[in-house]
Amino acid sequence: MPNFYNDNKHLKFHLSHPMMKKIITLRERDFKEKDEYDYAPLDFEDAIDSYEKVLEIVGDISGEIIAENAASVDKEGPSIVNNEVKYASGTSVNYEALKKAGLIGLSLPRKFGGLNFANTAFVLANEIVSRADAGFANIWGLQDCAETINEFADEAIKEEFLPKFTREGATGAMDLTEPDAGSDLQAVQFKATYDKATDQWLLNGVKRFITNGDADVSLVLARTEEDTIDARGLSLFVYDRSHKAVTIRRIENKLGIKGSPTCELVFKNAPAKLIGSRKFGLIKYVMSLMNAARLGIGAQSVGIAEAAYREALKYAQERSQFGKPIIQFPAVYEMLSVIKVKLFGMRSLLYETSRFVDMYKTYQRIAEERSLDAEERQEMKKYQRLADVYTPLLKMISSEYCNQVAYDAIQIHGGTGYMKDFPVERLYRDARITSIYEGTTQLQVIAAIKGVTTEAFLSRIKEYEKESLRPELVFLRKTLIKMTEEYEQTVQNVIELKDEELLDFHARRLVEMAGNIIIGYLLVLDAMRDEEYQAVAEVFIKRAEANNKERVYYINVTEQRDLGIIRQ
């Protein structure tokens, strides 16, 4: 198999985005650690070289090992042996390869054994691994839990747990959901009680649908405040598997991502340590954790879509019917063109979002070391607002596109795509979960609609509009400006009705309209750096314009009685 980084020039294209210089320079504090760590970069060029080399290693392991094991892992799956999760044999081989390569804890500080990589580099790695095996990406990608510990835990907890990831290759898990608290996490009833005699927090209760549930290190959401029923009574804890105070009740038998163990867990007086302060478990720490996870699902969605596109393209080139390869039939090459356009669009949105996250997270860390000046504070707030609305937009669009791409990839294969002889069948099953876990598409709309009503999306669109363009790209901007005017007027029309139910009813349509314009601009701006993106931008914007007009029409003709048809 090829190197999954080197064979995809679009990854290097996004790594070389102009904004990366500022992100890396800020993250490296002007490269002040070069005298303390021999592997710390000397300057920006040295840092990018390090990123490239590490991503090449990820690409090599993904192509040569993880992708080769994907089919057997899907078939074998994990099991429970003596109250421990036993990975499929291929999964163990995969993880050991990444562990030996030092690829656990990529973004953690060097003082804990990490590489201090920008979040965008980790997202790139996540896309690569997801292309090889989306189920395995869940296991490897949960090193994000270490980032939450690093961001919110006290120094003693950091010193205890973070080296477990970087030096021991520890696995992570987010133990959040329960049988009666899935999307509604403020309904969590799992208990944490403080034992004064032992100066120890003890966890009791059941957690369900926990990805990689038997991980070495788990972040657990629990209710600490008596007589509370909302988010203010919840706190976050870190649990070490070595305590052996958890029973694995079962591993779920899933449609896809079968190599990733999804567990039901029973905690009985499990000792744990409090992360940060009480009462902030959900409203601060888990929200940050889940936003990182949603960015990870964005990368996973792009990785699956990349794999599905390549399988469909290869099959269409090799399969002949009626005397010629099927790729020569308009019905097929149109599907492939649309797949490519969606793939490019979702990837551009993914890395735009990751750069926003990098900027505000880096400023947050700098603020812990020194006071930010007025310009820095303004930038931090700006990028935090953007990250807050772009993250659900990304999760919604990328996961929906991923499902559409996988669907069309099977269609291009015809009957053979429905058989387990071809990888596209597994990709189709793996894709389905992306629009469900870490918050369904419907929940992402609830979060993203704030970008519509607060004009956060519109403000950013206006910034894109002012960017300098080559003359041959100006006509695309003119179309996007018309689309923006139509979007702005439609939003105003809905808001002026002062009907919250109607706003909720049209929320997805409004968010999708904004997303179409944003992705259109991102592809145009990408075309400024690489002419290949112009053709993609043209096709995307034509389709997006028609898509938005359809939404405007339906919004305009909707009547109040249309909202309640199911309730009648």
Image: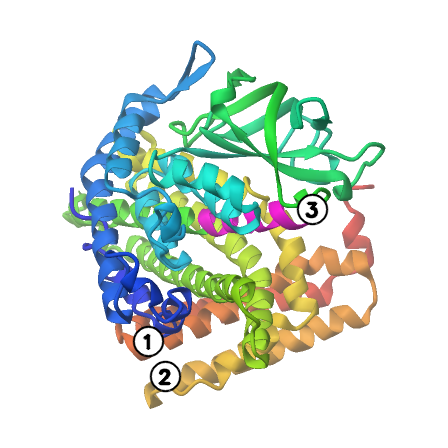
Asked which quadrant contains residue 73, the reply is: top left
One can see residue 329 in this view: yes
Foreground: disc 1 or disc 3: 3
For the residues bearing labels 3 and 2, Cβ distance under 8 angstroms: no
Residue pictured at 58% horizontal, 65% vertical: 384
Q: CA distance from mark 3 to mark 2?
A: 48 Å
Residue pictured at 24% horizontal, 35% vertical: 97
For the residues bearing labels 2 and 1, Cβ distance under 8 angstroms: yes
Q: Amino acid at mark 1?
A: Ala
Q: CA distance from mark 1 to mark 3?
A: 43 Å
Residue position for label 3: 280
Which numbered marker is on residue 490?
none
Upstream in the sequence, badge 1 or badge 3? Answer: 3
Range of residues picked out in magenta: 283-297
The local secondary structure at tag 3 comes to loop
Asked which quadrant contains residue 135, the reply is: top left
The local secondary structure at tag 1 comes to helix
Q: Amino acid at mark 2?
A: Leu
Which numbered marker is on residue 473?
2
Q: Position of residue 41 (x, y in %)?
A: 27, 63
Q: Position of residue 400 (x, y in %)?
A: 49, 50
In the image, taking residue 500 as reference, residue 267 lies left or right, namely: left
Q: Amino acid at mark 3?
A: Phe
**Residue density around tag 3, few if under 14, some if 14–19, many if 20 or more, within 10 Å:** some
Residue position for label 1: 527
